Each structure stands twice: as C-alpha cells, then as structure tokens.
Image: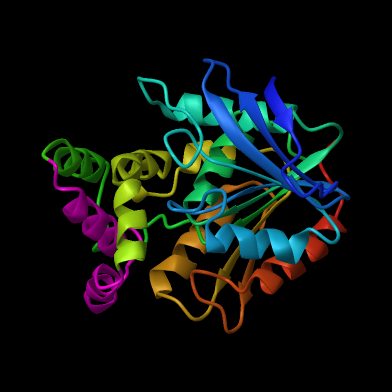
Amino acid sequence: MHADQHAPPGGHDDHLDRTVLSADGTPLAVAEAGSGPALVVVGGAWDHHGTPAVDKVVAALRDRYRVVTYDRRGRGASGDTAPWSIEREVEDLAAVAASIDGPVDAVGSCVGAGVVLRGLAAGVPFGRAVLWEPPYRATVDPHGDDVLFADFLDGHVAAGRRAQAVRAFLAQVLGVPIPYITAARLKPGLWRALLADAHVLSRDVRVLNGLSVPERVAASVGVPVLVASGDGGPEWMRAAAVALAESVPGSQHLVVPGQGHVPDPRVLRQLVDRFSRMPAAE
C-alpha cells in the first residue's frame, strides 16, 4: 500500500508523512503524529493536511494517540482519478486503515463523519468510531435539499461559477448565515482556500446521501459508535445527530454543552478518551 515513505525535515520521530495507494492507484497523502492507540481522523469539506482545523485536532490528540490523517482524493496533496464514486472514497479510507499496523479506531467530523459511516457500513475494520455532527439535513429540516443539489453544484463548477458553488454549499449544507459568507469573501486567503476545493463539494453532498440520513447504510454498521453534537449550533444539526444515532444499531448520542459545529479540539479529545475505554468490536 505504501508508495513512498519519509520523515519530514527536522527529524521528529513521532511524525511521518507518507503516501498510500488506493485500490484504483490513486495516491493519498497521509500524515501521522504521536504514538499510542491508532486513530484515523477524517475532517470536514475543507480539512486536509496543514489546515488549521486539522492541525489543532492533531495537537490535541497526539500526546496519547497515534493520529493518522489523510487528504481525501481531489483535495490537498492527494491525487484524483475519474470517475469519482462513493465506493472509491470508501476504498481510500480502507487503504489508509490497512496501512496501519494493529487495531485502529476512527473519528469523523462534519462531512468526515459521513465518510467514516460509509466505511463502517462497508466493513472497513475500525474497532469503534466517534462521529461529530454529520450535516444530514433533508430528513430533519423542512428547508433541506435532496440529491439534486449535488448536480446543482456540479453545474456551477462546470460553468466556472466556483464562488456560487462555495456559497451554496456553505449556506445549504452547513447552514452558515449569509453575513458570515460575505465576511469570508473579504478575507482573500480564506476565500481562495474555499474556492480551491469547490469542485469536490458535490461529492460531499453525495457522500451525505443527498443530505438525508442514510438509514440503510447506518443499519449495516456493526461496531460501537458514539454520535456527538453541541448545543450551540442549529437545532437541525442536533436532530441529524439524533436521527443517525437511532439508525446505527447500539450507538449512543451525546450532547456536549457549549459547543458549536466546530468543536473545541479538547472536547473531541475528551470524547475519544471516554469512548476508547469502551470495548471495541471483536
């Protein structure tokens, strides 16, 4: 599975950047930090190696865990191979998991929770998983959209309207208020980063089952799952977390006070610590 493997400059022996090949040959940029029980962490739509959100989560976990992150296909330093499919996203996650010796658990936040859920249902051998606020919307919010929204985003990107695709995704998938989206456009570095991944946003809508809770997928999960949400974000985010927990056999739902859609990394650490003491799947 390993196409390339090297330690970064500086010689930190607990950090490793490497490349894993997916089943279709797509190179995936993988990073590791820390030591201890292995955790694959999959973040949100714009989270990949070197982005602040990923760095903060890794920093919060690395003193106790072997934290493994990767750039999903089409993002960051990873490659991309046409045609895209949910199955290939699952193969990517499986390849990353297979490249780790010994048992491994998973943490998914936002869209990453949807990716991990797909992997669990397909049999990627994680012992257990913590999922934070997957933004399923259509079945819990009357203003949610359906799978056609992915085609709508693709249309914007194909016509060169990347900004419109980003705005639509932020508003309709994540529920970001319009004034916040407008403010993001006034920060050139941030806005360029958002535009850079515009072409993969429709994929996330498809991973998220057209924004509705994938009940049949969830019912196929056979390992312990903790679905967590904050009480500081939109009500539909908590409703989605509850609906997902009800669909995954034997899972738990937990509301964390004082947290919004992007949790304090220390809170994520506490959830992982708590859940890691529970028995994993055999």
The answer, for residue 67, to whether it is visible in the render is no
In percent of width and height, residue 236 lies at 39, 68
240 with respect to 10 (left or right)? left
**In the displayed image of the protein, which residue is found farthest to the bottom?**
258
Q: How many marks?
A: 0
**In the displayed image of the protein, which residue is found farthest to the front?**
10
Residue placed most toward the observer, 29 or 43: 29
The secondary structure that most of the magenta stretch takes on is helix
Quadrant into which the N terminus falls: top right
**In the displayed image of the protein, which residue is found farthest to the top?**
24
In percent of width and height, residue 257 lies at 61, 82
Q: Quadrant of residue 83?
A: top left
- Which region shows up in magenta? 160-187
Q: Is residue 162 magenta?
A: yes
Residue at x-position 20% and y-position 48%: 162
User: Looking at the picture, does residue 160 appear above or below residue 143?
Assistant: above
User: Looking at the picture, does residue 17 appear above or below residue 259?
Assistant: above
Tell me which colouring the rendered structure shows.
rainbow
Quadrant into which the C terminus falls: top right
In percent of width and height, residue 29 lies at 59, 35
In percent of width and height, residue 59 lies at 72, 63
Q: Does the magenta stretch include residue 90?
A: no
Residue at x-position 50% and y-position 31%: 89
44 with respect to 219 (left or right)? left
Q: Quadrant of residue 164?
A: bottom left
Residue placed most toward the observer, 186 or 94: 186
Q: Quadrant of residue 205?
A: top left
Residue at x-position 52% and y-position 15%: 24
93 with respect to 142 (left or right)? right
Residue at x-position 73% and y-position 38%: 126
The answer, for residue 11, to whether it is visible in the render is yes
